[in-house]
Image: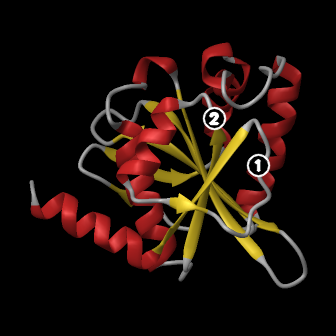
Amino acid sequence: MHTFTTKRLIIRPLDQQDKRIYCELYTNAKTMMYISKPFNLQQAKNAFAIMLKKTQIKDKNFITWVITDRYNQTPLGIASLYKKYANELLAINEVGIMLLPSFIGKNYAKETLEATIMYSFNCLSLESINFRYNRNNAAMAALCKKFNAQNDPTSHRNSEHEIKNITNHAFLTYLNQHYANN
């Protein structure tokens, strides 16, 4: 598992020093609004211990990175990539992101997701990635639309979540269109 960067960010594997940011994210009602009920502090510490262990053993089924400011190393949030198995033959890769409330709305989510998707396609050789998000999360819906993510035909729908899929080809098309205009 590698560290990767953007213009403003360093996205690095979860480490012991990240317990505070991890717990702050999972116990924050605003951050958890579209995910689940906020954890209590002990639940967040337990979840951190599990994710740290998976990161340390380099479990490729679940990778968690910490998003930090490139210039002052302030932690802004976390990004995760995990593999779910729909059945014995079908593995589904999903990406997720959580930012502290003070960093929401500043394009950090877009920047992080672009870099995480590029890393996933280029370094992990994934062919497609899913976004699973609460239907009320307008910001994630807008990002999926911007990335040209499509409804995932392999995923089971429910009334609470939307599931969008982006392929390597579709993401390259997005990058070419987006950055050719900038």
Q: Is 143 placed left or right of 93 in the picture?
A: left
The answer to whether any part of residue 1 appears in the image is yes
The secondary structure type at the circle numbered 1 is helix
Marks 2 and 1 close (CB-CB < 8 Å): no
Report the disc number at residue 51: 1
Q: Quadrant of the N terminus?
A: bottom right
Q: Position of residue 146 (x, y in %)?
A: 35, 50
Please give the name of the residue rendered at 67% of the width and 68% of the height, measured from the top-left corner. 153
Q: Position of residue 53 (x, y in %)?
A: 80, 54
Query: Vertically, is 86 above or below 88?
Result: above
Q: Is 144 placed left or right of 59 in the picture?
A: left
Q: Amino acid at mark 1?
A: Met
Q: How is the image coloured?
A: secondary structure
* Residue that mark 2 sits on: 135
Q: Amino acid at mark 2?
A: Arg
The secondary structure type at the circle numbered 2 is loop
Please give the name of the residue rendered at 77% of the width and 38% of the height, measured from the top-left corner. 159
Hey, which quadrant is residue 24 in on the image?
A: top right
Q: Is 67 placed left or right of 133 in the picture?
A: left
Give whichever of 155, 179 is nearer the camera.
155
Please give the name of the residue rendered at 71% of the width and 31% of the height, measured from the top-left corner. 35
The answer to whether any part of residue 10 appears in the image is no
Hey, which quadrant is residue 18 in on the image?
A: top right
